[in-house]
Amino acid sequence: MAKIKMSKKATSIDMTAMCDVAFLLLTFFILTATAKQPEPLPVQTPASTVQTKLPETGLVTLTVGKNSVGESVFFGMKDRDVRAKTLELMGEKYGVKFTPAEIAQFSLIEEFGVPVSGLKQLIAMPNAERNKSGVQPGIPIDSTNNELKDWIMYVRKANNVDLAKDKELDFAIKGDAKQQYPQIRKIMDMLQDQKINNFALVTGLRAKPKTN
């Protein structure tokens, strides 16, 4: 009996719908992603195996490192409302009147390093210009002009008194691995002078040594 041969047909899958879904997802992630802002004072943190993450809110960061003008300290605040209120208090302290537009713009700046007298000029700069090397010399911490001490004091007042937040602010020191210890110690002493005894030291993650 003769065998019946079945005709072979080419199989194909229409990928149009799959491509449409892929491009839609790609577009969604691009539009909703938040670009990482360049750091005005990049530092190479010391390595550590500790994996504790810093909080996303209620955090104040003091960055210690070197830029083109020498050793510098930068001040960062995570919460926008805290930034805005702290600027108002510092303006009153140093006799600098900030407009509502300047306060709103400052609330978008996560970290900065200029004297109070230079804040208006810094706020008016485009973001790319603001973060160029050498533009921000750092916050004064001299014995005759210690503005950093006032930033620490007034950020706590803004958080606890003016904004009446229940949670105390967390503080973190982010120092360069090559930074001399006396400068870091000076920042620690400044925090402890204001009864801030719990603070974090920011480190980079290092692989744990292998055990046999």
Image (tube, helix red, strand yellow):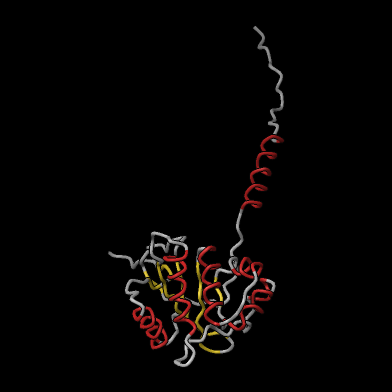
Residue at the limit of the structure toward the bottom, as seen here: 144
Count of marks, rendered view? 0
Name which residue lies at 53% across and 63% down: 81
Q: In which quarter of the image is residue 204?
A: bottom left
Residue at the limit of the structure toward the top, as seen here: 1
Name which residue lies at 50% across and 76% down: 75
Name which residue lies at 61% across and 54% down: 33
Image coordinates of residue 5 in percent, x first then y, are 69, 15
Foreground residue, 11 or 129? 129
Quarter of the rendering occupied by the C terminus: bottom left
Q: In this rendering, would 60 be left or right of 193?
A: right
Name which residue lies at 67% across and 43% down: 24
Q: Quadrant of residue 21?
A: top right
Foreground residue, 51 or 109? 109
Image height check: is 144 above or below 65? below
Image height check: is 108 above or below 91? above
Q: In this rendering, would 30 be left or right of 82?
A: right
Image coordinates of residue 146 in percent, x first then y, are 47, 86
Q: In which quarter of the image is residue 170?
A: bottom left
Foreground residue, 56 or 24? 56
Image coordinates of residue 165 in percent, x first then y, are 42, 60
Quarter of the rendering occupied by the N terminus: top right
Foreground residue, 184 or 85? 85
